[in-house]
Image: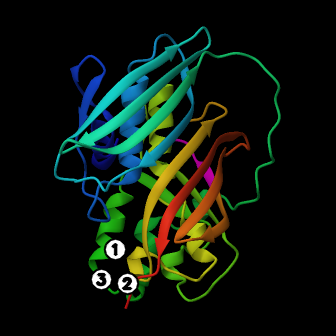
Amino acid sequence: MNEPLQSLLDLLDLEPIEQDIFRGVSRPAVVPRVFGGQVAAQALVAAGRTVPGERGAHSLHAYFLRPGDPGAPIVYQVDRIRDGRSFTTRRVVAIQHGQPIFHLSASFQAAEEGLEHQDPMPRAPDPETLPDAAELLPAHADKFPDPGVIDRLLEARAAVDLRYVEDPPFLTAGKPREPRSQVWFRTRGKLADDPLLHVCLATYVSDMTLLDSVLLAHGRGGWAVGDVVGASLDHAMWFHRPFRADEWLLYDQHSPSASGGRGLASASIYTQDGRLAVSVIQEGLVRIPRT
């Protein structure tokens, strides 16, 4: 396991303070606030640690309330809403400086059999044929007005191998295209078999690229090239089938709408053998900077 991946796993290993209260720290982010995927993953860890038995996470719904301070710890308070015969519900509030910055509701279910169907996996090239971040980003240094952006992006990708099927918006600014984006991702090293760990890592990664499809429709490069101000507003995920975050997963993303300074993106995450593992929806703040 490489050092950045171990650092990410340590980030998700929350410190228990009292019953149903946990504390987490932050890692340096690409932008000067706590990365939304981090706080969502940590909140899900907190919720999962209070769930009895072998119940796995099947859904989460969350709101990003305030920008997080990466220099301060985050306290996660878990409310045990319900422990039913098949389902367990938890509510988590993330607090910094005495104020809530994030709110999550998560549901867990005991395994059971049921009806089965899914959308087919869309076509995508083999991930091994695509460039990783270390190959892609330095080759396009001229696209970034701030040269430090590349270093921050590479640091953010150090624990997760994330490969774009087509050029991302920050490399194609000024060229609108279909509001669809695909990336393959997996952790840069093997993980333990704990299903909650794999779900939490997918939650972490899910916030990295989801709003790309919104930007593509308008030829906007995003914060990295300075033509958009954005932030996650809310986030929802449904975990349909077991998967491993240390094996290749296809993140197929699409934006059906943008209006009112907000953009909506929906996505599906497939295993490499074609199983639909996760569905994701997010709305984000997408504003054009005032000149």
Point 60% across, 81% down: residue? 218
Q: How is the image coloured?
A: rainbow
Label 2 secondary element: loop
Start-end of magenta stretch: 246-251
Mark-to-mark CA distance, 3 and 1 = 8 Å
Looking at the rendered structure, the kind of residue marked 3 is Asp
Mark-to-mark CA distance, 2 and 1 = 8 Å
Badge 3: few (under 14), some or many (20 or more) residues near its Cα, within 10 Å? few
Contact? badges 3 and 1 (CB < 8 Å): no
Q: Quadrant of residue 243?
A: top right
The stretch drawn in magenta includes residue 114? no
Q: Which residue is mark 2?
A: 144
Label 1 secondary element: helix
Residue 146 disc label: 3
Label 3 secondary element: loop
Contact? badges 2 and 1 (CB < 8 Å): yes
Q: Nearer the viewer, residue 154 or 222?
A: 222
Q: Which residue is mark 1?
A: 150
Looking at the rendered structure, the kind of residue marked 1 is Ile
Q: Which one is earlier in the sequence, the residue at label 2 or at label 1?
A: 2
Contact? badges 3 and 2 (CB < 8 Å): yes
Q: Quadrant of the C terminus?
A: bottom left
Point 58% across, 56% down: residue? 184
Q: Is residue 67 left or right of residue 161?
A: left
